[in-house]
Image (spheres, rainbow, N blue to C red):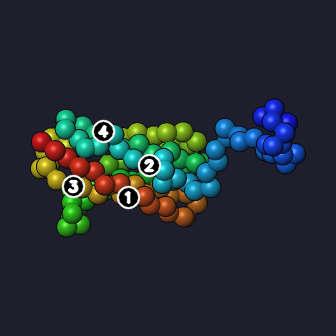
């Protein structure tokens, strides 16, 4: 008995593992920016690539869907990737960041909401 208690004994008890696996090329929970909200001139768009991607493109859109800028992402496999976005030329407001990764003809997109406060 793991707990040393006759009432909590369970021969089918399985201990949790620290191993986390992602089936998605671009896991949603590992795609974000920091800091958010952005008070300074730069925010960093961070994403994890679960495998190889032939390309990673990042689009920044305003709330009306107009393209503000595009960024070229890094595509280092099986690790966190990070791309800076200089917000000094944009107004305060909410922006959408679309991170798109392509691998073997398949695209995956993730959307981040970014608040810029000046």
Q: Could you tell me how far apart the alpha carbons at marks 2 and 1 are, in whole angstroms?
A: 8 Å
Q: Could you tell me how far apart the alpha carbons at marks 4 and 1 are, in whole angstroms?
A: 16 Å
Residue occupying image coordinates x 78% and y 34%: 3
Please give the residue where the numbered disc 4 appears in the rendered image: 35
**Residue 17 image position (x, y, % from top left):** 71, 40
State the SS at label 1. Answer: strand
Q: Could you tell me how far apart the alpha carbons at marks 4 and 2 are, in whole angstroms?
A: 13 Å
Q: Could you tell me how far apart the alpha carbons at marks 3 and 1 are, in whole angstroms?
A: 13 Å
Residue occupying image coordinates x 40% and y 55%: 99
The crowding category of the residue bearing disc 1, from other C-alpha atoms within 10 Å (few below 14, some 14 to 19, many at least 20), is some
The crowding category of the residue bearing disc 4, from other C-alpha atoms within 10 Å (few below 14, some 14 to 19, many at least 20), is some
Q: Dots 4 and 1: beta carbons under 8 Å?
A: no
Q: Between label 4 and label 1, give the one nearer the viewer.
A: 4
**Residue 68 image position (x, y, % from top left):** 21, 56
Q: Dots 4 and 2: beta carbons under 8 Å?
A: no
Q: Could you tell me how far apart the alpha carbons at marks 2 and 3 are, in whole angstroms?
A: 17 Å
**Residue 10 image position (x, y, % from top left):** 84, 46
Please give the residue where the numbered disc 3 appears in the rendered image: 94
Q: In this view, does 44 lie above or below 99?
A: above
Please give the residue where the numbered disc 2 appears in the rendered image: 31
**Left or right: where 37 falls relative to 92:** right
Residue occupying image coordinates x 38% and y 58%: 111
Residue occupying image coordinates x 25% and y 44%: 37
């Amino acid at each position: 008995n793991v707990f040393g208690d006759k009432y909590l004994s369970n021969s089918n008890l399985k201990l949790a593992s620290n191993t986390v696996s992602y089936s998605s090329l671009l896991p949603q929970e590992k795609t974000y920016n920091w800091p958010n909200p952005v008070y300074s001139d730069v925010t960093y768009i961070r994403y994890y690539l679960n495998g190889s991607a032939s390309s990673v493109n990042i689009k920044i859109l305003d709330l009306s869907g107009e393209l503000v800028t595009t960024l070229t992402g890094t595509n280092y496999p099986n690790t966190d990737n990070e791309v800076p976005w200089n917000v000094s030329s944009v107004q305060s407001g909410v922006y959408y960041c679309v991170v798109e990764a392509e691998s073997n003809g398949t695209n995956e997109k993730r959307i981040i909401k970014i608040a810029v406060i000046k």
